[in-house]
Image (cartoon, coloured by chain):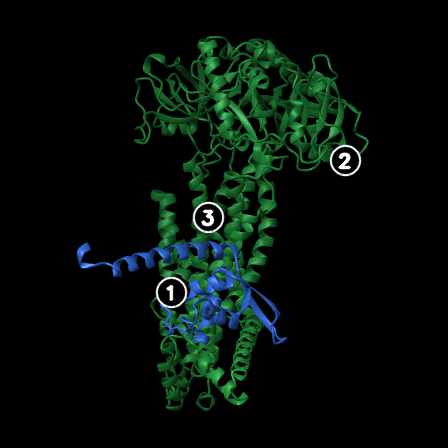
Chain colours: A blue, B green
Amino acid sequence: MAPSTDILPGTLDLLILKAVSLGRLHGYGVLLRIEQISGGALQIQQGALYPALYRLEHQGLILSEWGVSENNRKAKYYRLSAIGRRRLGEETAGWNRLAEAIARSLAATPQEI
Amino acid sequence: MLSGLVARVKSLWTGMRRRDAVEAEMSSEFQHHLELRAADLRRSGMAPDEAARRARHEFGMVEVHSGAARNARGLNNVDRIRFSWLDLKLGFRMLGRYPGLTIVGGLAIAFAIWVGASVFEFVGQMVRPRLPLNGGERVVSLRLWNAESSEEEFRVAFDFAAWRRELRTVGDLGAYRALQRNLTITEGFGEPVEVVEIGASAFRLAPEPPLLGRALLPADELDGAPAVLVLAFDLWRTRFGADTGIVGRVIRLGGSATTIVGVMPRGFKFPISPQLWVPMRLQFANYLPTDGPGLKVFGRLAQGASIEDAQTEMASLGSRSSADHPLTHRHLRPQVRRFEKSIISLDNIESAALLSINLFLAMLLVLICGNVALLLFARAATRESEIVVRSALGAGRRRIVGQFVAEALVLGGLAAIVGLVATKAGLRWWLGVIDSAEGNLPFWFSDTLGPWTIVYAVALMLLSAAIMGILPALKVTRRLADRLRASAAGGGGPSIGGIWTVLIVGQIAVTVAFPVLTYFIQRDVTQIKSLDVGFADNEYLTALVSLDPVEGDTAAVDRTMFQARFSESVEKLNAMLADEAVVRGVTFGDRLPRMYHEHRLVELDSGAAAPLNPSWPAYRVSAAYLDRNFFDVVGVPILQGRNFHSGDVASGSRTIIVNESFVRLVLGGRNPVGRQLRVVKFENQDKVIPEEERGPWYEIVGVVRDMGLAPYQPHDPKYAGFYFPVDARSIYPIRLAIHVNGDPITFGPRLRFLAEKADASLQIDAVKPLDSVQDGNLQFYAFWMQITTVLCGMALLLSLAGIYSVMSFTVARRTREIGVRVALGADRRRLIMTVFRRPLGQVAIGVAVGTVLVTLFAWSIMSDRMGLVHLGLIAAYAILMLGVCLLACAMPTRRALAIEPTEALRAE
């Protein structure tokens, strides 16, 4: 497993939006999905996940509904809303632009200066 | 962005409304998470207990995450100021526990909301009315505006034909004009009614079908079609007894037999609240540009068209007309406006001025709320121990303020309900007063409250709750910790500081000053009623006499022929009246005593005269045209010179008779007979007439006593004026004055019968005894009297309640001190004076300030007529008000005098 990396501030929301965009999930499932899609590189502090989930729900970016989980228990499931999908697209594009810019900066050689 | 905002509001609302359920769901979700994590750890080989412990450890502090989750939903902010349903229940309980405050404070807030909502609704109906028509917001008026003279051109028959033919953006076009016709139901008794001659398309705007029969149809407008009419609901009810068999009945309208074909439902009064409608029979295609009678045009915007689209199309038609008819249409601009603008035309500045009245009334509410807040503060001060204990148990200041706001919301909510109910009732009454005094209120005015009025009332209620709740709460919760320590030592407690003192003093000052308004209103009413016109006017019946115009096009009727026909009919009527046994005399004029007389500016010949009033470029006097026999018939003697004779009404004659005030104010008491004057400006003119254009000189031939020329200026009932002699050919309409044996009003029906016999087209209106011609205005005075009386009562109630609360608060706060000092031997009465010195001082200052306001107001009205008598009256009034205010101190003083030291110390 790749060494885990600390979540940069402000990126947890983006990761949650991405996780639920791949299918409806309960809170624990979001945690596992983020670990899965990051190849284990990103691990979220568990309790801190829920304030982020509620914040995104409060902003209307994700929607929730109650269902039955795999352990036959009542659980709250989250899915992406239309405005959440739009926000995910915007944030992803922004993140990619930033990552490209940083990667280009880090790849700079003395000859390019 | 909007959807995000909606989501936030929805989430917040859910969190507030289902607080406990939301908390339970959060706990359930956390628990579920822990179970799943523990299950994963068990699957990895960990022991169940260890897995559960590890899961909890990884999750972290549940309470911390719960708080963060609550914050993420925005509920923490609500927590800080939240009030629960329990606070509202407590608020209801407080209403019952303090009934005096509930009644006084509730009435005061209800009054402020009533006034605010009433004016808001009335102004709204003026500035932005809701037309009770089919597609009311799309009904428009079309007009021609003369850009050169800046006035409307009403002769639009030619243009109307073109608009009807060519306009695509406006449909259901119709024209109308207002007329007055004699309606004769029973032979011999005709009464004028307000008629609108209108196109049948108007009835497509009605939201409901006719109550009986049918509306007007296009076929009714054809030349030669039978004469028909449609009744308005009110006329059908009052003149026809709501007869359901009315359709088909033939009556006489303006002398012609006309069939009633329908009755419109209650509320339909398009376009100008007529009593009945008749079809428009003008042949528009036959008219030349700017020819024909004055008309108004209406229509409805076509589907998908806006007013701007219609204006563009009208402008295009207008350009074509200007090119085709330059002589008449060069300066005429066609315009399209919302229909109500053709009835009440307010520009942006006027609308803003009217709307700003709401701001003024909101300030009135703030003022009243401040006073009620004082009462609530006094109540809150008695609950200090409760508040201090709650604070000690952990309730923050915001939480306590929230409780006070909740209690104020309950009081304000009940007051708002009472205020809104009063608004509807008050509006119905107020509209009735205006309609009966002025007549023809715009048809859309109703007592129905619009949704925005209710929103406004709720906003006022919330504002009042915020002021009444927050102000006293902040005062009472200030430095709670210090007061907790101080109260343990037997002292401390909130005090009435500077702002509250100003409030109390201001309240008392207003209470003292306001009733003066009622004095001046009553004084005006008394002077109007007691005006001595110099003869027994209660024995005279007056009536306004006019003539139905010839059927069809009034503009084509020669004015001279019309006047000749009118004077012939009037002379015939006068002759018939003179033959009546009960009639002692008949005379007429354009104005009679007690009626408003128009002003003129006049210049005198070169002889000596009184100094001019510097406010006017010439002498300002009133005038009237009277029958040459007027003074003989009413029995008013000529004091100097001679009376009018037949030669004075001959063509070219220029004589007048002046009154005593004219001799005194204009001629300075000099002999008026033989002097001359001429008019330099009429009331309806903006500027003085240039010298070369002024009319002839008139010679003064006699003097009569003052006969009530200026009932509107009762403080100066003797007003300078003069009279022109005329016969019935010279003035239109005329006002008859008939001297009758017995009660003059009983002669009214006989007068109508004789008028019908003399000429069926004669219209007899405004029939009443001469001494009651001011009744309409007295009704307005009565209305204002009622309003100011209610305001005075409200102000007095608040003041007395405020004084009582302050005194009670003082007693409650200083009970221990009074008990201790009495125990140490202090004289009770002197002690009470010391304790009450401050509140009594506030009362005295308030009365003094109010007295000064009264004096200033009286001086502004009476100026140099104000004398020692008036100052004495003001002083007596001030003493009376001081006494009334001190009455409110009686109970608290009695309580203070009854304090027993042992009881006072034991209570601590």
Q: Residues within 10 Å of mark 1 (few under 14, many from 20)?
A: few
Q: Residues within 10 Å of mark 3 (few under 14, many from 20)?
A: many
Q: Amino acid at mark 1?
A: Gly
* Place of residue B29 in the rendered image (x, y in percent of width and height, measured from the top left): 55, 74
* Tags 1 and 3 touching, CB below 8 Å: no
Q: Find the residue positioned furthest to the right.
A: B245
* Place of residue B835 in the rendered image (x, y in percent of width and height, measured from the top left): 38, 78
Q: Which mark is residue B242?
A: 2
Question: Is residue B139 something one can see in this rendering?
Answer: yes
Return the residue at label 1. Answer: A10
Q: Considering only vertical position in the picture, is B559 above or below B116?
A: above
Element at label 2: loop
**Disc 1 and disc 3: Cα gap in Å?**
48 Å
* Place of residue A98 in the rendered image (x, y in percent of width and height, measured from the top left): 33, 57
Is the residue at mark 1 from the same chain as the one at mark 3? Answer: no
- Nearer-N-terminus badge (3/2): 2
Return the residue at label 3. Answer: B358
Task: Say how many tags the image has.
Answer: 3
Is the residue at mark 1 from the same chain as the one at mark 2? Answer: no
State the quadrant of the C terminus of chain B: bottom left
* Place of residue B339 in the rendered image (x, y in percent of width and height, measured from the top left): 55, 31
